Amino acid sequence: MDARITIVKRSLNDDLIETYFPEREGKLMACPAFKDGQVFEIKGIFPTKPEGFCDWAWSDIQRNVAMACMGAKLPSGCAFTCCTDGLRPVTFRIEAIESKTDT
């Protein structure tokens, strides 16, 4: 199996920034590492971080990607997870896909 990672949504928690980091209010933007709708495909059962993928986000989601690549049954056929940046989280959709060698 292979896996597909889709960037579902990049968020900016303005309320948290305003409350806890007022000096950064208006200076932060949603995560610049990704674009909404961006897609990454991972090949093989031992997934490696795609080129250009955020190191921190990969650390947060790699377990879900590995499970998809190993053919684990995901709820509703996919998993939704996010990076741990509490101010600028990115939500990812991870799904198992048939690899060209699986057919």
Image (cartoon, grey):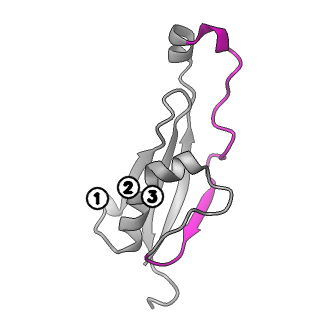
Residue 31 is drawn in which quadrant? top right
What residue is drawn where x is 61% and y is 63%?
A: 50
Q: CA distance from mark 2 to mark 3?
A: 12 Å
**Amino acid type shown at disc 1:** Pro
Question: In the rendered structure, which disc, 3 or 1, sits on the residue that comes first in sequence?
Answer: 3
Image x and y of residue 46, in percent: 45, 74
Residue 73 is drawn in which quadrant? bottom left
Provide the secondary structure element on which disc 2 rests: strand
Q: CA distance from mark 3 to mark 1?
A: 17 Å
Q: Main secondary structure of the magenta part?
A: loop
Provide the secondary structure element on which disc 3 rests: helix
Disc nearest the viewer among 2 and 3: 3
**Amino acid type shown at disc 2:** Ala
Q: In the rendering, which numbered label is found on residue 79?
A: 2
Left or right: 74 as drawn, with respect to 16 = left
Q: Are marks 1 and 2 in contact (CB under 8 Å)?
A: yes
Which of the pair 49/80 is nearer the observer?
49
Left or right: 76 as drawn, with respect to 89 = left
Position of the N terminus by quadrant = bottom left
Position of the C terminus by quadrant = bottom left
What residue is drawn where x is 64% and y is 32%?
A: 30
Crowding at dot 2, Cα within 10 Å, few <14 / some 14-19 / many 20+, comes out as some
Q: Are marks 3 and 1 in contact (CB under 8 Å)?
A: no
Which residue lies under the disc numbered 3?
62
User: In the image, is residue 8 above or below residue 52?
Assistant: above
Which of the pair 85/101 is nearer the observer?
85
Residue range of the region highlighted in magenta in the rendering: 21-45
Q: Are marks 2 and 3 in contact (CB under 8 Å)?
A: no
Q: In the rendering, which numbered label is found on residue 75?
A: 1
Does residue 52 belong to the magenta stretch? no
User: In the image, is residue 51 above or below residue 8?
Assistant: below
